[in-house]
Image (spheres, helix red, strand yellow):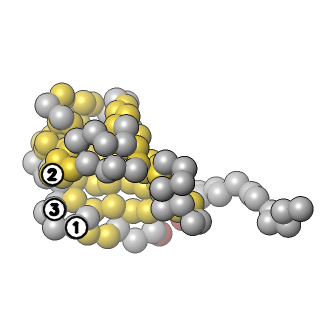
């Protein structure tokens, strides 16, 4: 019998705001804040913040899909202009990137979900 007790993770706005912003690799003007990490799976959720004109170079994740919701501002992803409220799903193995954030920058809520067994 599994004795682990599962429970919901609830982060009120002040707890989210208290999470540190970290630089996103070598990309200038891009930072992220982790909200959730699935123990043992390397799946996670967070918020990316891109300053005006900032970009994330194209790349591919062989074993993970991305789900991205434009929460604030606008950006260009894979050549398409996306405003707040837009959604993107990138399956594992598909090349993707953020070509550029709009003039006010943007905030992206994302899920990075590893495929089971990888």
C-beta proximity under 8 Å, tags 1 and 3: yes
Q: Residues within 10 Å of mark 3 (few under 14, many from 20)?
A: few
Give x and y (percent) for residue 70.
Answer: 34, 38
Residue denoted by label 3: 27
Q: Earlier in the sequence, mark 2 or mark 3?
A: 3
Residue at (40% x, 71% y) in the render:
20
**Relative to 31, is 104 above or below?**
above
- Residue at point 20%, 44% (across, down): 98
Name the residue that disc number 1 marks. Answer: 25
Judged left or right of residue 19, residue 30 is left
Residue at (14%, 31%) from the top-left corner?
79
Residue picked out by circle 2: 57
Q: Mark 2: which secondary structure?
A: strand
Q: Tell me if residue 94 can be seen.
A: yes
Residue drawn at the location 85% of the way across and 66% of the way down: 3
- Of callouts 2 and 1, which one flags the residue occurring earlier in the amino acid sequence? 1
What crowding class fits label 1: few (fewer than 14 Cα within 10 Å), some (14-19), or many (20 or more)? Answer: few
């Amino acid at each position: 019998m599994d004795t682990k007790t599962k429970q919901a993770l609830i982060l009120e706005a002040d707890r989210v705001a208290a999470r540190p912003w970290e630089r996103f690799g070598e990309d200038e003007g891009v930072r992220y804040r982790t909200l959730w990490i699935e123990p043992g799976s390397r799946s996670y959720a967070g918020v990316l913040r891109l300053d005006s004109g900032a970009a994330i170079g194209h790349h591919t994740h062989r074993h993970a899909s991305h789900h991205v919701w434009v929460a604030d501002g606008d950006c260009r992803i894979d050549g398409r202009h996306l405003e707040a409220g837009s959604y993107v799903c990138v399956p594992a193995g598909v090349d993707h990137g953020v070509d550029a954030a709009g003039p006010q920058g943007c905030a992206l809520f994302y899920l990075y979900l590893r495929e089971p067994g990888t």
